[in-house]
Image (cartoon, rainbow, N blue to C red):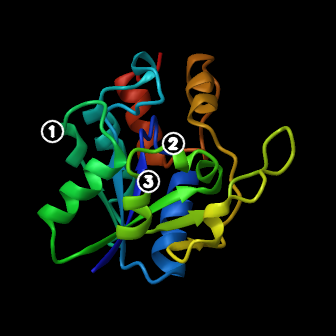
Amino acid sequence: MKIGLFFGSFNPVHVGHLIVANTMATNTDLEQVWFVVSPQNPFKKVKSLLHEFDRFDMVKKAIADNSRLKATDIEFSMPRPSYTIDTLRKLQEKYPQHTFTLIMGEDNLDQFANWKAYNEILDGFGLYVYPRPSRNDGPAPASPFQEHPNVRLVHAPLLDISATFIRENIRANRSIRYIVPEVVEEMIVRKKFYL
């Protein structure tokens, strides 16, 4: 099976994540998309992160009705911070019957040369890239990686939803309805997340 891996802290998972994942699962040759819930992103401060098991539960609840989408906690048992290449190697070892590719936003292509073993990711797994809204300083310059034979640009809706905005709304007691799935909103309210 060909599986796209969608990495993120999903803090919390929101409709933008779900639309990208579903677009990848239905508009490409990917048979499934797995949400790889990261316990700690090397580029993010840990203190703003909800506990990984809570974030994993929110993702599982958000995608429970879609057989093309799955959640994996593979990184929870790995050394931290975890690097994408290490996770890819571990998944390939654990599931040799599948082929994996990495899903990323176009904005990440700018920094991709700074990733650990980025050439191995490109050559061994490849990238499916979705568009991201242009930055405040104008559209991002085209990345040289866009021309790589293992990079596939996928047409997907442009969504500019930030988890930071969602967390700020929760702390300010403002609505997050329609920005996150109903089951996720219910869980956030019930468990008093992000307050």
Which residue is labeled 2 in the image? 114
1 vs 2, front mark: 2
**In the image, is 61 to the left or to the right of 169?**
left
The amino acid type of the residue labelled 1 equals: Ser
Measure the C-alpha gap from mark 1 to mark 3: 22 Å
The N terminus sits in image quarter: bottom left
Marks 3 and 1: in contact by CB < 8 Å?
A: no
Residue bearing mark 1: 77
Observer-nearest of 68 and 185 = 68
Residue located at (35% from left, 65% from top): 65
Dots 3 and 2: beta carbons under 8 Å?
Answer: yes
Residue toward you, 24 or 2: 2
Q: Nearer the viewer, mark 1 or mark 3?
A: 3
Q: Is residue 85 left or right of residue 102?
A: left
Q: Is residue 153 above or below residue 106?
A: below
- Residue drawn 60% across and 36% down? 176
Q: Position of residue 159 (x, y in %)?
A: 68, 53
Q: Secondary structure at mark 1?
A: helix
Q: Estimate how packed mark 1 is, as few (under 14), some (14 to 19) or many (20 or more) residues with alpha carbons within 10 Å.
A: few
Q: Amino acid at mark 2?
A: Asn
- The residue singled out by tag 3 in the image is 118
Q: Is residue 88 visible?
A: yes
Q: Residue at x 57, y 17 (%)?
A: 171
- Label 3 is placed on what type of residue? Tyr
Residue 91: quarter of image: bottom left
Q: Position of residue 51 (x, y in %)?
A: 30, 26
Q: Is residue 161 left or right of residue 163?
A: right
Residue at mark 1 to residue at mark 2: CA–CA distance: 24 Å
Which of the two discs, 1 and 2, labels the residue nearer the N terminus?
A: 1
Which quarter of the figure has residue 53?
A: top left
